[in-house]
Image (cartoon, coloured by chain):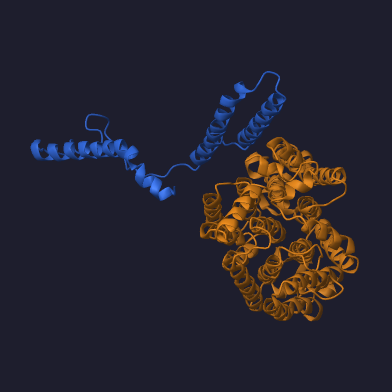
Amino acid sequence: MNMAEKIAGVWPEIALLLGAALCLLVGLARSVAIRRFTGWIAAASLLVAGWIVAAQVCNAGGVIGLTPYIKLAVVAVGLILLMVAAAVPVQLKMTRDIEAGREPFEPGLVIRGEFFAFFLFSLTGVMLTADASDLVWLFLALELTSLPTYVMVATSRDRVEAQESGVKYFFLGAMAAAVFLYGFALIYGATGQTSFSLIVDAANQQIAAQGRISPLLTTGIVLSLLGVAFKIAAVPMHFYAADVYQGATTAVTAFLAFVPKTAGFVALIALLGLLPDGYVPPAITWLLWIMAALTMTVGNVLGLMQSNVKRVLAYSSIAHSGYMLVGLLALHGSGDALGNGTAAILFYLVAYGLATIGAFAVLGSLQARGEEAETFDDISGLVRTHPVLAGVMLLSVLSLLGLPPMIGFLGKIYLFGSAIQHGFVGLVVIAVLNSAVSAVYYLRIASACFFGDSEGHTVSTPGISRPLAAGIAAVAALILGFAGGRLVSTARDAGGFPTGRNDVVTTPSQPPAATTASR
Amino acid sequence: MTTITLAVSEFGLYAPVGILLLMAIGFGVANVALSTVLGPSRHGKVKGMVYESGMNPIGSAKRRFNVRFYIVAMTFLVFDVEIVFLYPWASVFPSLAEGSPYGVLFLSRMLFFVLTSIIAFAYAWRKGVFRYD
């Protein structure tokens, strides 16, 4: 596939990019009324991007491959995230004072434009990750996802903790980028190619010649997996998660819990797609096995020991990465959703995203003593002051826990079911035990909301958008749990096409042999 | 032929580079050593100054710079890198065949790229990066 055809696939990203540029410029307008448009511009560009993806899907005969699936998920969840994040600029004292007319307008001190621009840039990065069919493209897309989030963490809160966590996140992220870039370099060194399909060809030739892929290629893939593990906060690259999630403002934390993780899993699926069909070196299988087991266990055990709800949810996010790593082991499956790890991960990403964003949105809707609510004390007895928010929180944690009516239950069934079909029974036993452990801290959140004593110092933040977003996420998690059939079948179709060969899906007219012939 | 045997057999090709390197090091070392051994040595306060026959230095060289220089440097970098990307494009563009359908595509793509930098520049300007007061 040449570059011109590739560009035709990225119109949704271009729409988001233009929206981001517009946000930057409009955010500098002298009039407050005009500056307030930035959030709406971001929403409009997301809708336009979603419309373009839908049109592309219709043109391709209604088949939703992995790439359009991720893009649609990013648009849908991105709109909920935008509702949660819409009030972030107003939370900053400088922006608030200037907009209330207490201070003269000074373009350098208002962050209305940048915040939404970075929001859109990061989502653009996830979409581009789903488009990747080349190592260089994949690297740039992953960095485009991460770089804006560093700034969002540091600038979205008037506290030194936010800057501390931003700096931590930046340096550790740069280190992780170096690790997976080195892995990419080794993959290139072992095969002489950067294009995914050509790398698969080279790996097939190595298998034909020696019965295995070269150690250099294995090392390259292992290093890439480790580096990308930072994006999904998997052990051993999980250290930053709790501090960064706590330091960032709650809306940005919700963003961090979904967006980089999605990009990371799409990249992991693409990287494992570099291996020839049905062949996974034992080293990589064991690496994923151990990473999955450790990630789940570390996340859940450390989650038990926290007194801060945001830190609990951070460790819960680590644990969920562990569950999804289980699905990664069953990647090359049959078309059935129960046997196909890719489909299970794609479904679980949405399930996890809705539940965790619901929980963070509830936290973001509350404030205690002028600060964001984040400890168990702050949400204690929530049901007496804010019954709806307490209900939403209950639905969210039940979905994270994976109880039957919720979408999280379906997600876990598919993940663990696909792993069992591939013979990873031991790992699934560990995963189920971990789910049981996680019940302790999830139910602790729920019981604090429902049975705790309210000290009456928790009030809601102004604005309706956050409670609304929390409600939408929780109701969606509930409805999709009952009637998720359409999403499941879509995820199954999407999972049937591993990336690296997604070129074939987006342009059915092109024969798959064309890429090999062009060498 | 593997990379290693290739490196050994073709090593002769690198000999001129090695000889040049040895000559450069030898020239530098020889000059410093000979002038230390043979030359007269006189020390003094004036002679030890940074610019022996220039301005008298004021203060230390290790002083703090205003952070705005950093932002200016970053803005410079944006345009520096943009030129780096423009250069290969400019060297390929004239070699397109007359009436090639890619002409408009290539040009508009580069214009889009330049436009992103212009937006960045306008943004930086409005944010007061270039204002010194």
The hue of chain A in the figure is: orange
Q: Say above or below: B44 vs B110.
A: below
Residue A374: x %, y % from top left: 70, 68
Q: Say above or below: A272 vs A405.
A: above
Please state which of residues A206 and B127 is positioned toward the viewer in this rendering: A206
Quadrant for residue A370, please give it.
bottom right
Quadrant for residue B13, please give it.
top left
Residue B61: x %, y % from top left: 34, 42
Q: Can the viewer see residue A211 in this picture? A: yes
Residue A312: x %, y % from top left: 68, 72
Please state which of residues B83 and A379 is positioned toward the viewer in this rendering: B83
Quadrant for residue A255, please give it.
bottom right
Q: Is residue A89 left or right of residue A286?
A: right
Please state which of residues A93 and B94 is positioned toward the viewer in this rendering: B94
Quarter of the image that includes the N terminus of chain A? top right
Residue A377: x %, y % from top left: 71, 75
Q: Is residue A478 left or right of residue B36?
A: right
Q: Can the viewer see residue A166 in this picture? A: no
Quarter of the image that includes the C terminus of chain A? top right
Q: Say above or below: B105 vs B44.
A: above
Q: Say above or below: A318 vs A493.
A: below
Which chain is represented by blue in the image? B
Residue at the front extreme? Answer: A209
Please state which of residues A283 and B43 is positioned toward the viewer in this rendering: A283
Q: Is residue A325 left or right of residue A470?
A: left
Identity of the residue drawn at 50% across and 37% down: B73
